[in-house]
Image (cartoon, rainbow, N blue to C red):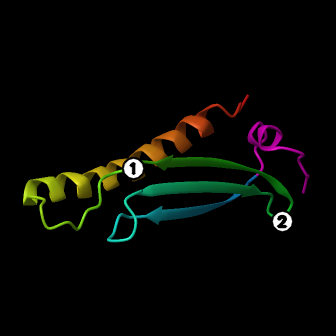
Amino acid sequence: MRNYQSIEQASRSDSPLIAKLDMKTRLINNRSSEPESSLSLEFHTPDGHYLGTVESNIKRSLTPLWTNNKREQEIIAEIRQQGEIQQQALELLDQRLSKIPTE
């Protein structure tokens, strides 16, 4: 088994890697109007040698969700925006992963 010093080095080899995905999502509620999605993909060799982490984080500020003066359509739109934040964080992580050289 070989140890690599970086994700880039390991990605150029045919050796297996272990990837650990950590996803944290904060949704809006009556105390917070800043939904956030954070993703972290940590890479290790099979023997546990740490190689590096690729991260993404998307955060927005919205108006508080649970107010008495909002219509149903506004609430639905804001709930959908929270899903879009998660999607954008996944897309950003994918972009960062695609920049790791594999050849």
Residue of label 2: 48
Residue 54 image offset from top left, x and y in percent: 67, 47
Observer-nearest of 83 and 54: 83
Front position in the image: 91 or 76: 76
5 lies above or below 12: below
Q: Which residues are magenta?
A: 1-15
Q: Position of residue 44 (x, y in %)?
A: 78, 58
Work out whether residue 80 or residue 14 is closer to the camera in this orientation and state it: 80
Q: Mark 2 belongs to which amino acid?
A: Gly
- Residue 49 in the magenta stretch? The answer is no
Query: Which residue appears at 33% of the width and 51% of the height?
Result: 62
Q: Check the picture and name the quadrant holding the N terminus.
A: bottom right
Residue at x 73%, y 28% (from the top left corner) = 103
Extreme residue toward the front, this view: 69
- Secondary element under disc 1, as helix, strand or loop, is loop
| Residue 61: assigned label | 1
Left or right side of 78 for 85: right
**Residue 61 in the image, given as x and y percentages of width and height:** 39, 49
Q: Is 57 left or right of 36, judged from the image as shown?
A: right
Determine which quarter of the picture holds residue 78: bottom left
Q: Is residue 91 above or below residue 86?
A: above
